[in-house]
Image: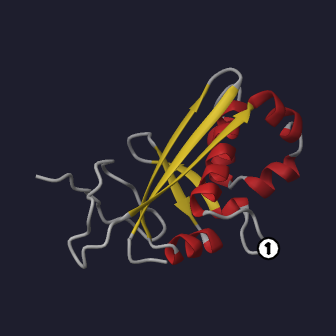
Amino acid sequence: MGARATLRPTPLGRVALRTLALPAKRASGGRASAVQVGIDLVEIAKFRRVFGGRQALLTSVFTEEELRYSRTKRPAHPHLAARFAAKEATLKALGTGLGSRLSFRDIEVSKEFSGAPRLVLHGAALDMARARGVVASSLSLSHSVNYAVAIVLFLADGAAP
């Protein structure tokens, strides 16, 4: 018996990968599913030097929910750095960089009810993901005293370009 991917329906722009055991072929049409991965590592001291005390810069990069969550943590910088790494990893998984259409705020780290991080795409980021056939995503965050890391995985319909 082959491995199967189990997906649950989610609200628009909020997709979650339930398992990493992916099928080799799709049931319809026999096309393989594509997996797109992005990873990013942020040095927390450098992040603090760039963003520390710059409220306008913080609000141009992070959503209100991300800022509110991180402010409940002491210190806040490792949590913000992990969210920044998630935004960069998402851009890598999408195969793009920031452009005139895309904003860091189009990529948001939210939380599942369980507390697990969840990737939420808005605006141009959501449009790009849809154009690439993304049907599910998974996000993992971690940080230590010195570094924050994020890994983003997208499962895309093999029929997409």
Q: Is mark 1 on a helix, strand or loop?
A: loop
Q: From the top left corner, tell me how far across and down residue 149 is, in percent.
A: 61, 36
78 vs 158, nearest the viewer:
158
| Mark 1, other Cα within 10 Å: few <14 / some 14–19 / many ≥20 | few
* Left or right of 138 in this view: 50: right
Query: What residue is rendered at 25% in x and 79% in y?
Result: 29
Query: What residue is rendered at 37% in x and 54% in y?
Result: 17
Which residue is situated farthest in the left direction here? 1
Q: In this figure, which colouring scheme has been used for the structure? A: secondary structure
Residue 18 seen by the camera: yes
* Left or right of 27 in this view: 61: right
Query: What residue is rendered at 39% in x and 77% in y?
Result: 159
Residue 76 seen by the camera: no
The correct choice, above or below, for 113 with respect to 29 in the image is above
Answer with the quarter of the image where residue 134 lies.
Answer: bottom left
Q: Exactly how many numbered labels are in the figure?
A: 1
The correct choice, above or below, for 74 with respect to 123 in the image is above
Instruction: Give the residue at mark 1.
Output: 100
Identified by mark 1, the residue type is Ser
Query: What residue is rendered at 79% in x and 73% in y?
Result: 100
Q: From the top left corner, tell me how far across and down residue 38 is, in percent.
A: 57, 50
98 vs 23, nearest the viewer:
23
Q: From the top left corner, tell me how far across and down residue 153 is, in percent.
A: 47, 52
Which residue is situated farthest in the top direction here? 145
